C-alpha cells in the first residue's frame, strides 16, 4: 500500500509499515529515514547514550557516513511484539574509515514503541548482542573479516 510520506502516519498500522520500509532501506546505515514516523521528542537510546529529539537522530545518522566506508546489514528478525511495539534484529558489519580499516560486527536490535494517540514512535532503543566494551574493542583490532 502506498502512503503519503509527506505526512505523519494516520494509523499504527501505517507507522509499522513505514518502519518496516525504513528497515528494508537500512535507514540506520544509509541515513535515509522516514522522519515523520518519529515524535519530534522521541527518545533514542543505545548501550552508551540516550537523548531526545528526532532532528538530532537524523543529524547523527548523517554524520555516520564519514566514519563508515562499507557496511552490510542482514535482517535476522522482525516482530510486532504488541500493537504498539516492534522489535527488529540485524547482523551488522561496518568497516570504519580509519587507517587500519577495522570491521565492527555484531547482532544489533531495535525496539520501537508507538504512541497510540499520535501513531508516532516515542522510543527507539538499540541493543547489541555483545557487551558495549567488546564492541569498542573491535575498533582497535585489525580487521579479521571483510564487509561484503
Image (cartoon, rainbow, N blue to C red):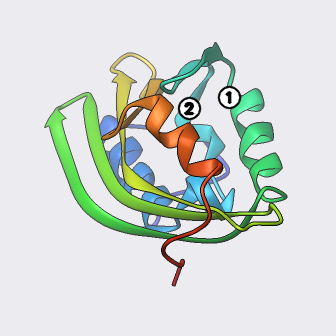
Residue receiving disc 2: 38
Instruction: Determine the residue positioned at 83% across, 66% down.
Output: 99
Residue nearest the observer in this picture, 41 or 126 = 126
Viewer-proximal residue, 88 or 18? 88
Closer to the camera in the image, 33 or 119: 33
Which dot marks residue 54? Answer: 1
Q: Is residue 75 left or right of residue 52?
A: left
Point out residue 79 in the picture as x, y percentages from the top left corner.
Answer: 18, 47
Kindly report the distance in space between the C-alpha atoms of the residues bearing marks 1 and 2.
7 Å
**In the picture provided, is 47 more to the left or to the right than 35?**
left
- Which residue is at 80% across, 61% downward? 98
Q: Position of residue 91 (x, y in %)?
A: 36, 61
Neighbour tally class for label 2: few under 14, some 14-19, many 20 plus, Cα within 10 Å: many
Say if mark 1 contacts mark 2, CB within 8 Å: yes
Give the structural element (helix, strand or loop) at label 2.
Answer: strand
The tag earlier along the polypeptide, 1 or 2, is: 2
Circle 1: is it few (<14), some (14-19), or many (20+) Cα within 10 Å? many
Amino acid at each position: 500500500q502506498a502512503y503519503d510520506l509527506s505526512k505523519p502516519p494516520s494509523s499504527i498500522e501505517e507507522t509499522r509499515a513505514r518502519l518496516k520500509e525504513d528497515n528494508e532501506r537500512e535507514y540506520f546505515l544509509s541515513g535515509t529515514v522516514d522522519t515523520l514516523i518519529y515524535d519530534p521528542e522521541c527518545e533514542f537510546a543505545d548501550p552508551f547514550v540516550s537523548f531526545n529529539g528526532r532532528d538530532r537522530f537524523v543529524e547523527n545518522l548523517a554524520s555516520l557516513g564519514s566514519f563508515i566506508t562499507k557496511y552490510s546489514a542482514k535482517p535476522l528478525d522482525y516482530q510486532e511484539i504488541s500493537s504498539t511495539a516492534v522489535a527488529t534484529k540485524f547482523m551488522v558489519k561496518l568497516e570504519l574509515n580509519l587507517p587500519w580499516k577495522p570491521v565492527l560486527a555484531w547482532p544489533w536490535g531495535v525496539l520501537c514503541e508507538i504512541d497510540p494517540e499520535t501513531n508516532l514512535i516515542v522510543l527507539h532503543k538499540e541493543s547489541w548482542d555483545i557487551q558495549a566494551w567488546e564492541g569498542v574493542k573491535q575498533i582497535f583490532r585489525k580487521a579479521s573479516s571483510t564487509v561484503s
